[in-house]
Amino acid sequence: MEQIEIRALVQAVLAETKGLKGYFIVRAQSRREWSLRLSNGRLDRVSTGGDSGYGVQAFTKEGASGFANSDVLALELGRTLIDKAIRLARRNEAIGSKRNRQIWEAPQIQEEVRNPAQKVFGEISLSELQEKVISLHSRLRDGFPEGSWQTSYRQIEEVWCIGRSDGTLVSFVIPRAVLMHQGTVRDQGKAQSTLIYRSGMDATVLFEELADHSLEKKAMDRAAFAKAVCSAPHLPSGHYPLIIDYGLAKGLAHEAFGHAVESDHMNESVLGEAGKLRIGLRVARPGVNIIDGPLLGDWAYQPFSANGLIRQTVTIVKDGVLVAGLGDIFSGEEAGMPVTGAGRAESYGQIPLPRMSNIRLLVDRMLPLTPAEHLMDEVKVVRETLMQNGELREGEKNLLLLGYRGGQVNPKTGDFVFQCDGIIDVADPNLPIYQPSIFSGKILSALEAIRGGLGEGCFDAIGACGKGGQSVASSGGSHRYLLMDVDQQVSLGGEQA
């Protein structure tokens, strides 16, 4: 269903709530996705899919809520969902469920944001997309035949409309596309893999890749690095001065810090005290900043919350001090933070939760860096830049961590464990490569260790964020690299599983 049709449907369903006691939110969504995957020259998956429906969330005067949804976008179901949702709200009120009246105070908004895609969904046929992806996959296999390669492409379009009984009505379209190459190389009986991607709003990413082949070059560079890692030695466990790339920095900002400032988990957060965000707490050195907010064309772009509020850009950490959190309409005030429109939902059938969008970690002290076309050439530039600025410590290792393989964080204690693709000692002019090691420690210690950045901001590190049984698109980054001092609460060591 198109944006104008969904908008009209939500308006019509809201009209059914006139005269009823209570407050209502109607969320409608239509989602389409095309995807395909090639493995070593063979097309092994082509899929098309979609989903649509809407949900009604009802609130009693006292603030108890109920929710009902349908996977059919049809007006005739509207009154049924309304009646079911308000009955559930009254039942929840009767059994003493938690109440919240903040939605009654939400500002009224009326806005329609048009689809920002350059090439709308379906403008390029599936068969033409398939042809282009096959061409890119074939070039990569020819360029690096010793690798085992998978190439995949996903194109998604989500149309949303959120209406509220106060007259609010917002609608928007989220287009996303990503091209990914995953390679596996083997050497001396060991195997290493690499995954790189190029994301955007639509099929334009394929046309751009066909023009400049930048992802192909990056894939071959990373595959060569992975092959070198296969025969590389392990590092002794210890505490080292580190340089982390922006993908790993995004993981640190997102997993180890961003979740800790979401308003629904303050009782379980190292950054909370008595259920409130510890605003004013110094968490890093002066000059360190963490910002979250939507960027047009980004993988995690979303201009409005799933509660119909403007998604604000929030400076979470300013000059090393915790100044704000990611507050949604239902838990922000209780957590002692402003409401910033942080509520996101995976689909129409789920209740929104406070979530990040694009989170980036930036520092005031930034050394300029000109990116090189090839990985090891860029590593040499990194070394030269650090040498020129007196940033390398003689007689000890200075380790560059490349890639982000995920990890785990305990938001209550602030402990994190991350994994990388491999390590290079840039203090050694020979640039020796080491096996991946576990990067672990305390989140506040890791932030305190950050002393500077290398290069301009890179914010296109993408992923999927899981919380409360929902998965939403996430993204972010930092400067191209971040510099970190030795810290006894931040360790590198242990073999990667």
Image: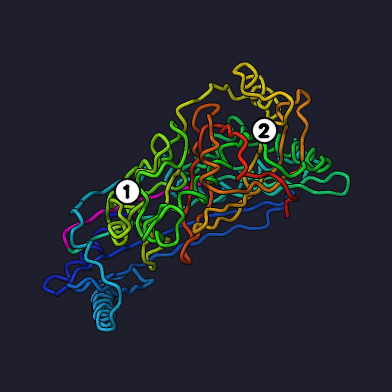
Q: Position of residue 293 (x, y in %)?
A: 38, 44
Q: Position of residue 180 (x, y in %)?
A: 61, 46
Between residue 34 and residue 446, name the one nearer to us: 446
| Residue that numbered label 1 is attached to | 311
**Which residue is outermost to the left?**
19
Q: Is residue 294 visible?
A: no
Per the rendered image, the range of residues in magenta is: 166-177
Q: Position of residue 196 (x, y in %)?
A: 63, 42
Q: Amino acid at mark 2?
A: Lys
Between residue 9 and residue 314, name the one nearer to us: 314
Q: Main secondary structure of the magenta part?
A: strand
Q: Amino acid at mark 1?
A: Arg
| Residue that numbered label 2 is attached to | 217
Tell me if 257 is positioned left or right of 45 in this view: left
**Which residue is outermost to the right?**
188
User: Does residue 303 show up magenta in the picture?
Assistant: no
Between residue 285 and residue 50, name the one nearer to us: 285
Q: Position of residue 157 (x, y in %)?
A: 43, 53
